[in-house]
Amino acid sequence: MMLELLIGVALVGALVTFVAPNRIAGKLAFAISLVPAALSIYLLTAFDGSGNALLADGGTIAFESSVEWIQFGEYTISWFVGLDGISLPLVVLTTILTTLAIVSSWTPIDDRESQFYGLVLFIEANLIGVFAALDFFLWFIFWEAVLIPMYLLIGIWGGPRRKYAAIKFFVYTNVASLVMFGAFIALVFSLDVTTFALPEVTAAMLNGGPQTEIFGLGGTSLASAVFLAMFLGFAVKVPIVPFHTWLPDAHVEAPTPASVLLAGVLLKMGTYALLRFNFTMFPDEVISTFAIPIAVIAVISVIYGALLALAQTDLKRVVAYSSVSSMGYVILGLIAFTQFGVGGATFQMVSHGLISGLMFMAVGVIYNATHTRMLTDMSGMADKMPIAVGVLIAGSFAYMGLPLMSGFAAEYFIFFGAFGSEFLEYAPIFTALAMFGIVIVAGYLLFALQRAVFGPYELETDYDVGRAPLHDIAPMFVLLAIIIALGVAPELIFDMITDAVDPILEHGGES
Amino acid sequence: MEEFFTYAPAIALLPLAAFVVALVFGDAMPKKGAIAGIFATAGSLGLSLLMLAAVASGEVHHETYYEWAVGDTAGHTAAEGIAFTFGILIDPLSALMLVIVSLIALLVHVFSLGYMNAEGEKGLPRYYAELGLFTFSMLAFVFADNLLMAFMFFELVGLCSYLLIGFWFRTKSAPSAAKKAFLVTRFGDYFFLVGVVAIGATFGTLAFAGDGSFVAEAEAALDGGETLFGFDAETWITITGLLVLGGVIGKSAQFPLHTWLPDAMEGPTTVSALIHAATMVAAGVYLVARMFGYYALSPSALAIIAFVGGFTALFAATMAVVKDDIKQVLAYSTISQYGYMMLGLGVGGYVAGVFHLMNHAFFKALLFLGAGAVIILMHHEQDMWKMGGLKNKAPVTYYTFLAGALALAGIIPFSGFWSKDEILYDAIILGLESNVFLAAYAMGLLAVFFTGFYTFRMVFLTFHGEPRSDAAEDPHGIGWSVKAPLVVLGVLSLVAGVANLAPVGKLLDLDIMFLEGWLDGEYGGLEELTYGFYGDMLPYETALIGGSEETTLLVAAALSLGLAFSGAGLAWKLYNVPEPTEHTQRLGGARDVLRSNYYQDEVQVWLAEGVTLPVARAADRFDQTVIDGVVNGVSSVSLFGSSWLKRIQTGLVTNYAALLVAGFIGLLLVLGVYGGWFL
């Protein structure tokens, strides 16, 4: 019942915070969020799972609980949750980032606090649900439910173009979800199953494949069509070029804490779903049909995303576009289909969540003081805000993949796993091309630092620019500590990740 | 003496501790954190000397301390899996380098007391913390026992250079120079990282030494005639070797990635001394020496190393002759000298290259610290045309600087002569057999002339003649913390050559080539990392003038010494006068080319700002208009959004949100009851 407790605390906490007075909402939400954070860390220590939650051969799902819920014709929908080595690190990432995002909201959010913090906790509950759910319908409820509060956070507390950005985010990702939903339902109807439980759907898919025809498609061609539709659906969420344009708009308009959760966890929903569905449920021959095109768009996402970041003059936009680039690495790691590739991709999900969260917080702290994010307006911020700028520099180097920080470990695993891949043709060439991203990322981040934080102090502002309060700084140091810990000792989570990844790579023979 | 090795990790960890202490407590400490750094580097030096003693007694330390990540390899290699580890390898090469690095770091710390602390500088804790981190990174790089660990600390060395070059961040120029240094070297490191990944994926190991080292695996693949990644073994070894070399070319400032180094003079002079002598720039060449066995398997890679080195040696030396800033002259001399080391290694002169790396560390640290002393004397003036006449006013600085200059110019018996001569000797004997290498030799030889010239132009302009400014008339005083490091390094620049008096030993048939013996494992070492072992792997045959070693030695030495003296002599004639004038006009059009550094910077700035940035902006426009345009058009977000959004006014949204949340929870409850969940 641990996972129910985790989700329940966040959900009840959301309600309580929602009706609490604005004055205490921030502190209250922080106190409440400590419970899921502590629980999830307990889960990390008590984790007794092995193997992959969807490929249960010989493995065990940790903290599993399953209750039949709804009978829908001959199909059963269950409350079915559980964790494996892939989902647990993401749950921990979610709870920790939520707590830190709440603390980092204390300064910028000064309007309708109770609703704001209530929504943040509500997002947390659903994010945990997304990573824990093992029944498709349950998963889809959480998946969709995340969108609503995020839509509201951007639409109410966002910047000047918040309405456009919020609607764009909501509609774009919703349409994509619809495509994915339709495709998956079609697949289930063609399979020999009477449940939406993901492990059983996976087993049916791998050990027989589609039995009936849908729209005149059957067998491998149906599987390929579903793979493609689901890939496109998730591609928007990740986002992969060319489906990425909602992201910079959403980030730029979103308040800092929403950006932290958006970049930190919401983008990982897309890559997590790709790994869980596309790369786990489908037999090798289906995946390999799409290997080259996927590798091509992975490389394009990395390089094109980095070039876009280079062209920006808004610091937050720089960080937003760099996410497109970083998610390209994840896709490359997945399609390499090796232990280090897929494991590195999962590691990168966690690592990028921490690092992009840190970057958005640092940018937010500077924005709180200066009320501008334009590189052209600022100069020499290091003089006025040495600690916040120090963290921004550290975060930038983490983003660039500085060794002994988690970003390097993630990228190195992906590069190593991809370079030697035999699954992906021309793997060394794709890898070498994508790796050039590490040069461009250094280019735009160092350029931004040079403009904004170094040089003589220049800023035309009526605001009093000074050192940030402790509660703005402390969350960033927590993130920095985790980033360094994972960089020095990636095995802290890489072991459990590879344990859950291995069955995926082995399932090819069963189909 | 094996028990000494227990303390090996502390060599690097002590400066790391100093980093933390200086960063956190620096402001409250006397000397603002310098003390922590001095104690830590002194400790590192002491321990490094212990390691040296232990190695001399025949011990070698090779131990894995920590597994960073373990996993499967993908299938290109027979290896079952791969473990990425942190381990320490202390053999003759790394023990020697540890001593050099920790010694220079200690002297730089001491010198900083007089250079940085005296000026009421802000941010000293940051300065000392970064020096500590720099020393830590370099020492860990030096004793790394595998290529990935080496890469990781190589990158950290780059970070520290960035931080220290940009130390005076309130100026416009320092952050720009720091960015350039990091970016240009990162460009090289990109190739290095591809190389690391490729070598790991090919051989399933990244260890430098031991049974399963990647060098041994590569040799086996070569002998077995294997096909690796679709190439024959030798081609693939060459490709991967050259990829790693990309990092070397960046960090060791070899053509065409040398452009960051002169700009890096924006950092404090003490930092320049550390970067040029013992850390950042030295890291590249050290890496080639560390994995020399791998390069020895590839004649093409070696030839490229030799030619890059020879060309860089000459190319940089020509640019140094027209510089006015004392630090700029030294910067180009560094590029040139590392070119010599690359030339030496490329022609198979492993001992000669390492020998020059050591000697250069001493004399270049000396020259930079000497330049720092001059800058103190001159009240922060760096233009040599405003100096003059410092010889009598600051004799300690003058004579130590002169010792460094003589070593740099390669004048017998100073240390630089012996190692440079050995490099050129190794180049000529190879060139006599394979004539193409004569071109590399010729470039190295010609550079000797330019080196002699610019070195003494610098000495004469700075110290001789009449004072040419008020500052030079009345120099600032300097303290013991400045003088002591100069004296130590001055003595070393004079006597370090004794380590390997190769020509003397060969001519008189004396067994005095201690460094060669050291690197050949005579005192102890790992078989596969010795000079002799490399010698057997090398694809080279050599020849001698008239078949006589004596003749060849004497001719080679006479040529290089003669050219060094001619260069120095020309400088004497032109600049050792009471009122020296610029003679650069006589160069005509060449002067502009040299002053503009062959327009190298322009090309790179154009690549960054004239090509990459416009491409990025075009991509951005494309993204905003085409891609996003399609999105907006298809979904008509703007159309139906505008009418719909009118309803989302503040009050309404609140209710909406509350309804959504309540509705969602209600839905779950209903479904729960329906599903018999609460029964």
Image (spheres, coloured by chain):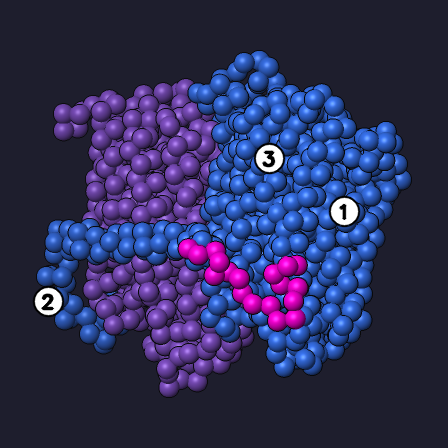
Chain colours: A purple, B blue
The residue identified by callout 1 is B412
Q: Secondary structure at mark 2?
A: helix
Give how far across and how far down residue A207 sits, in percent: 35, 22
Q: Is residue A38 visible?
A: no
- Label annotation for residue B441: 3
Say which mark, if any, is on residue A246: none
The quadrant holding residue B511 is top right
Which x, y percent locates residue B446? Answer: 58, 42
Q: Amino acid at mark 1?
A: Ile
On-image quarter of the C terminus of chain A: top left
Label 3 environment density (alpha carbons within 10 Å; few <14, some 14–19, many ≥20) = many
Q: How many numbered marks does the figure carry?
A: 3
Q: Amino acid at mark 2?
A: Ser
Mark number, residue B643: 2
Q: Chain of mark 1?
A: B
Of A487 and B520, nearer the camera is: B520
Label 3: element kind = helix
Quick one: A357 or B511, which is closer to the camera? B511
Tell me if A192 is positioned left or right of A341 in this view.
left
Looking at the rendering, which quadrant does residue A377 occupy? bottom left
| Marks 2 and 1 belong to one chain | yes
Q: Chain of mark 3?
A: B
**Image check: B41 left or right of B170?**
right
Of the residues tagged 2 and 1, which is closer to the observer?
Answer: 1
Local packing at callout 1 (Cα closer than 10 Å; few below 14, some 14-19, many 20+) is: some
Query: Which span is picked out in magenta?
Result: B572-589
Residue B87, by quadrant, is top right
Q: Nearer the viewer, mark 3 or mark 2?
A: 3
